[in-house]
Amino acid sequence: MAANPDFKKIVTGEVELRFPRLDQTYRFNNAAKATEACPPTAQNAAWSTGFALPMNEAKALKAELIEHYNQCRERNRKLPEFSKVFGSKVILDDEGNKTNLVHFSAKRNAVTGAGKAARQPSIVGVDLQPFDAARLWTGTVARLRMNA
């Protein structure tokens, strides 16, 4: 089966994870204004993590994503103009000033668009053996492979 050209594989260098939620599915509870663990069948259930890139790497990633989107748009003219990379924002310091880092979010919904259960993201250690996602925390350095 041929790969879907609408999805581009992105592999990061070593990045620092921010709020990795990969051990089980979570969702944001609007009433409590907090993220909570939930079963995979719950509405908006997903696995997610954030990571930060230096501004120059973030700009290069954005340019790569824009180029890929425009290629997809050539195949499907119904797609709107590129507007932004969802889940990305410049990190501010304690005084509210922009830093040289851009935060990105990566997420996998627990249920696919077709209504089927999605696979939990695979996590492997440096020895390429399965790694316990519960051992990941903010500050863990990892490489990410994701689809855009």
Image (cartoon, grey):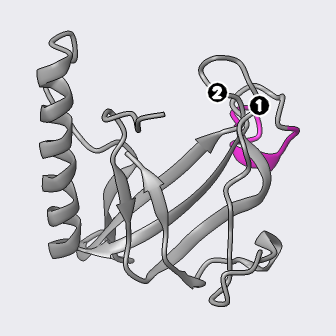
Q: Is residue 35 magenta?
A: yes
Q: Is residue 146 magenta?
A: no
Q: Quadrant of residue 49?
A: bottom right
Q: Residue at x 39, y 77 (%)?
A: 94
- Counting residues from the N terminus, which is met first, the one under dot 2 or under dot 1? 2
SS state under label 2: loop
x, y percentage for residue 138? 62, 77
Q: Residues within 10 Å of mark 1 (few under 14, many from 20)?
A: few
The reply, left or right, for residue 37 in relation to residue 104 is right
Residue that carries the numbered disc 1 in the rendered image: 117
- Residue type of the residue flagged with mark 2: Thr
The reply, left or right, for residue 111 in relation to residue 56 is right
Residue that carries the numbered disc 2 in the rendered image: 112
Say if mark 2 contacts mark 1, CB within 8 Å. yes
Q: Is residue 34 above or below residue 143?
A: above
Query: Closer to the camera, 127 or 90?
Result: 127
Magenta range is 28-39
Q: Is residue 16 visible?
A: yes
Q: Residue at x 70, y 60 (%)?
A: 21
